[in-house]
Amino acid sequence: MAVIGFIGLGHMGGPMSANLVKSGHTVQGFDLAPAALESAAGQGVTVVDSVAAACRDADAVITMLPSGKHLLDCYGSEDGVLASAADGALLVDSSTVDVADARKAHELAGEAGFRSVDAPVSGGTAGAVAGTLTFMVGGTEDAFRLAETVLEPMARKVIHCGAGGNGQVTKMCNNLILGASMLAVSEAFVLGEKLGLSHEALYDVASVSTGQCWSLTTNCPVPDMVETSRANHDYEPGFSSALMLKDLRLAESAAEQSGTDTAIGRLATELYQRFNDEGGGAKDFSAIIHSVRDQS
Ligand code: NAD
């Protein structure tokens, strides 16, 4: 069993680190928030008082932080991960960050002599608790093989997506599809409502036809169609609209940098921005259907 440093014990990192403990690893956890430390301690995480202490003698150091800025600060600061990790430690970043920041983190790790992977996740807080996350991993084959073993207790799937940064590329491309498909499904239901079509009729046909997608058949934005839908739980997340907006913005930033015309992505970003401005950020991203209705 390994010693794992875990930095960032929030909504995702808390339950992820708990699953590592359950599988027999020793987890040295650090967070800036006392409440996060207290909760992790209750799950068997050995809480420590600094990034450096989390890294001490660890075989792997996992970060689960809000943004690329947090990640690069945490890696590069005096007493940060790069200054404190043990020789040979594997660095795993599972935060969702800008591709450019992910590539910078790999570059800094490589210069400091560490193997590293970016390994963002899909599956939300429910997947973090259940240990059923999908990890999208960018890095060398060698680093991926090491990461697979570390990630396994938190994962349903661990997929190698190519070179460093490609985990983040995969995540933002997936969420571009997700944000756009949720808007399309929401618009279809509202259009149907306006024209006198029942939710059931549209669901029964589209779910077995060419309109079928995850946004319809797993997280349908209207209640009572599918059990797993957050619409049945007053749109409590799930995956919040604020995080969807964050990921769509990351996709737009990468599209600009790479000269890709993502017209649908731009529009989805604008519509989620408007919904967040209207106060919908804490709701599941499927609640965007309210915004479609309000504008109709
Ligand atoms: P969160 O805000 O709940 O947790 C982040 C934690 O990092 C906080 O507890 C904060 O105190 C801590 N932190 C910040 N800077 C730190 C530092 N320098 N040292 C130690 N701790 C520090 O966020 P979350 O929901 O757990 O999300 C974490 C990451 O996972 C984000 O990048 C997010 O986009 C991504 N993500 C979240 C979800 C989700 O459903 N919540 C799903 C997929 C991906």
Image (cartoon, rainbow, N blue to C red):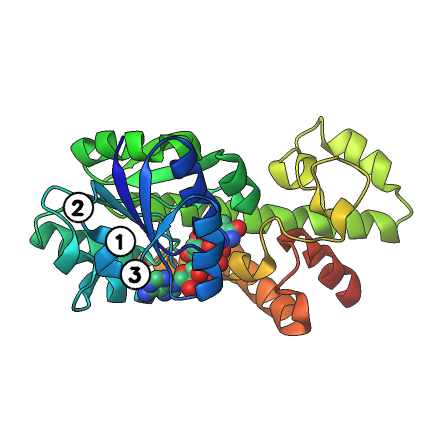
Residue 23 vs residue 112, the one in the foreground = 23
Circle 2 residues within 10 Å: few <14, some 14–19, many ≥20: many
* Disc sitting over residue 71 in the figure: 3
Are the residues tagged 2 and 1 within 8 Å (C-beta)?
no
Q: Please identify the quarter of the rendering in which residue 9 is found.
A: bottom left
Looking at the picture, which amino acid does disc 2 mark?
Asp
> Do tag 2 and tag 3 residues touch (Cβ < 8 Å)?
no
Q: Residue at x 66, y 31 (%)?
A: 210
Does mark 2's beta carbon lie closer than 8 Å to ligand 1? no
Along the line of sight, the residue nearer the viewer: 119 or 172: 119
Can you see residue 67? no
Nearer-N-terminus badge (2/3): 2
Seen at 22% across and 40% down, the residue is 139
Residue under label 2, please give it. Answer: 57
- Quadrant containing ligand 1 reads bottom left
* Residue occupied by mark 1: 54
Kind of residue indicated by mark 3: Leu
State the CA–CA distance, disc 2 to disc 3.
20 Å
Q: Tell me the number on the disc at residue 162.
A: none
| Quadrant housing the C terminus | bottom right
Q: Position of residue 64 (x, y in %)?
A: 37, 53
Q: Which of marks 1 and 3 is in front?
A: 1
* Image quadrant where one finds the N terminus: top left
Counting from the top left corner in percent of width and height, residue 143 is at 20, 36
